[in-house]
Amino acid sequence: MKTFGLIGYPLSKSFSQKYFTEKFEKETIKARYLNFPIASIDEFPELINHHPYIGGLNVTIPYKEKVIQYLDDLDPISKEAGAVNVIKVDWTNPTKPKLIGYNSDIIGFSKSIEPLLKSNHKKALILGTGGAAKAVGYALKSLNIDYKLVSRTPEGDNQISYHSLNEAIMNEYTVIVNTTPLGMYGNMEAKPEIPYHYCGENHLFYDLVYNPEVTAFLKAGQDQGAAIKNGLEMLHLQAEAAWEIWNK
């Protein structure tokens, strides 16, 4: 049976396994989808060696950047973005599979946010600096939206600190994207520390978190009159894009 799976840590709240299991049942596809929680990315080569039937993998927190060192090739988009969330495993050579990295997060995010964008949405703040933030940044760039990354410990010209977010910046950057895990089920009261009171109806709040449906971050934006969107549609879109990558 063809096997696909997800690497990350922890994986107790995995969306992917449920989604693909239901997809396989509905479409009568002879395949299975397994979770592979690995506490360290150093375990990745051994995982591949022990499972020579894997056709493809999804990658989630915290390995979207760290896994790249173990891949044989990257498609141009994931190479430029610097993050991978899909791995195609090519077993043409049965003794040594070829691992190719892709990024379907970019596809999912772009298609999900584009219908919500208005003429005043010219600049964005991306909360967080991990692999998901890199994918969001690439997508925003392709949509002609300038962005800055917001970090607790900013590095480089395109990163700013949470403490530097003032009224002028919040008025200028009207798209706010949360790529951190703050607000996920289990810690639902948490939200990024930004000055929500400077936001209003010109703002669009997008949270990659999808459980709960309305996170504390989205609720704070909604209370100020901002449009809001969670990450569930993005997950569906990126999952279908991953399936196409594995089967092309």
Image: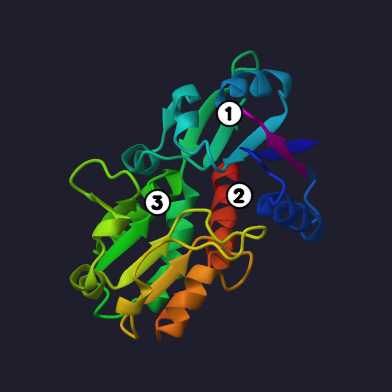
Q: Secondary structure at mark 3?
A: loop
Q: Secondary structure at mark 1?
A: strand
State the residue at coordinates (49%, 73%). Answer: 218
Among the two numbered marks 1 and 2 on one chain, the one whose residue lies closer to the N terminus: 1
Residue under pointer 3: 128
Residue 206 is drawn in which quadrant?
bottom left
Give the residue type at disc 3. Answer: Gly
Give the residue type at disc 1. Answer: Asp
Mark 1 Cα shell of 10 Å, populated few (<14), some (14-19), many (≥20): some
Residue under pointer 2: 243
Query: Residue reaching furthest top?
Result: 95
Above/below status of 135 relative to 113 = above
Label ID, residue 90: 1
Give left or right: position of 39 versus 160. right
Mark 3 Cα shell of 10 Å, populated few (<14), some (14-19), many (≥20): many
**Magenta stretch in the rendered image:** 32-39
Q: Secondary structure at mark 2?
A: helix
Give the residue type at disc 2. Answer: Trp
